[in-house]
Amino acid sequence: MGLGAFHRSHQAWYTQHAGDAGEWGIAAFTGRRPDAAKVLAAQDGLYTVVERADAGDSFEVIGSIVEAVDGADVDRFVQLLAAPLTTLITLTITEAAYRLDVDGKLDSRAPDVAADLALLSGGVGRASSKPTTPLGRLVLGLAARRDSDAGPLAVVCCDNLSNNGTVARSAVMGMAKAVDGGLAAWVDANVSFVSTSVDRITPRTTDADIDAVAAACGYRDESPVVTEPFHNWVLSGDFPAGRPRWEDAGAVFVDEIEPYENRKLWLLNGAHSLLAYAGQLLGYKTVAEALADDSCRRAVEDFWDEAAANLDGADLRIPEYRAALLERFGNSRIAHHLAQIAMDGSAKLRMRALPVLRAERAAGRSGQAAARMIAAWSAYTATATGLQDPQAADIAAANLLSGRARLEALLDLLDPELGADSGIVELVEGLSETFADAGHLS
């Protein structure tokens, strides 16, 4: 589930490079729009991965996607999920799509979730059932798999969420329990939820990228993917029906994934969010541009210091990871646009800023660097047009307020405990003033 650029530069790339790649194929379903499936289907699932380094580009045709399907084709999705040959399903659906509330439970009040629950409660086996959310479609597909006695399978979460396998399980089980207790019991006994840490910077493809592939390769690929040479995948969990030999492509399987997740979520994704909001307020468009600003770089380094103080494990090699991130972020040939990173901020900050802020304050420290990320987000929401966020309406309502009332309302959307903590409110409020001068970040 999820046929975006990241899936194609990461899970599909790893499957192409698995030692037993010839035994596996991916049926990939789009999310909100059918466009990617239409383009790939016209190319028999083939596309080019462009690894873009300072020294130049390299090109590789990927053939691991054997079927590209419009996500709205629920019948085909259900048919494939009910097939015994289907052994695992990866989720690359964005953080917001799991529809969990601040307590980590399914937000059944979200309009799209409520609509799917009402539809599925009428009978998950009905042919007329057409859920619109990824969770609703997955629950419908799992019901079909149970009914066809196709056996167990693994759900592999590939989104930037802490303990993402647990998150996926909570979301799926929450919906399954709400519509069919027997289905929930079957899922609990037959479906494993694998946690992963995924890492490969993959910006949105541009028309110039399409032209570059045509010039270098001599063919027209309407759906190439541009990515950095670096790639990393850490997985933890069971695969009851088997999996490709991703370790042959460099994937790492571990018993405890949380330290690796936190390293990536806080250091890479946290820095990305900080740069996305602060950088755009200062007039920058890409990660490389923002990082070249001394004030932005200091803010990132300060946040990394706070995050590193709460990361344990010698195997994490934090100094080397930070150095590599600076090199990766500074790759000016990878135009990673800040506007793309800034989407779904209310969901992302819960995973990237809040854990570090809480850990720092629990240790008796201010958490100022993590709070600066929240302050930058707060300032950004006041100026952004067409904000893309699962809580966009609530953010807009909060922005109609002024002063501390506005800030408290925004913090409540991240976590009600934040808005009720006067110390945190005062800290974020003071840091928000640093964005008043668009010439620098103090």
Image: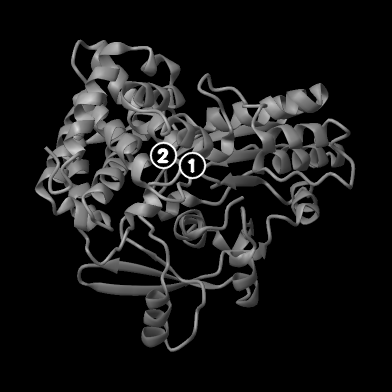
In this picture, residue 16 sits left or right of residue 405: right
* Mark 1 surroundings: few (<14), some (14-19) or many (≥20) residues within 10 A: some
Q: Considering the image in quadrants, where does the C terminus appear? A: top left
Measuring from the top left, give residue 435's x and y in whole percent: 20, 39
> What residue would you read off at disc 1?
389
Measuring from the top left, give residue 410's x and y in whole percent: 40, 28
Task: Please identify the quarter of the rendering in which residue 190 is found.
Answer: top right
Mark 2 to mark 1 CA distance (whole Å): 6 Å
In this picture, residue 198 sits left or right of residue 272: right
Q: Residue at x 42, y 73 (%)?
A: 60
Measuring from the top left, give residue 240's x and y in whole percent: 64, 37
Type of amino acid under label 1: Asp
In this picture, residue 116 sits left or right of residue 381: right
Viewer-closest of 214 and 239? 214
Q: Residue at x 9, y 47 (%)?
A: 294
Q: Residue at x 41, y 39 (%)?
A: 345
Measuring from the top left, give residue 111's x and y in whole percent: 68, 35
Viewer-closest of 290 and 179? 290
* Mark 2 surroundings: few (<14), some (14-19) or many (≥20) residues within 10 A: many
Helix, strand or loop under label 1: loop
Helix, strand or loop under label 2: helix
Q: Earlier in the sequence, mark 2 or mark 1?
A: 2
Type of amino acid under label 2: Gly
Whether label 2 touches label 1, CB < 8 Å: yes
Q: Residue at x 42, y 85 (%)?
A: 214
Count of residue discs: 2
> What residue would you read off at disc 2?
345
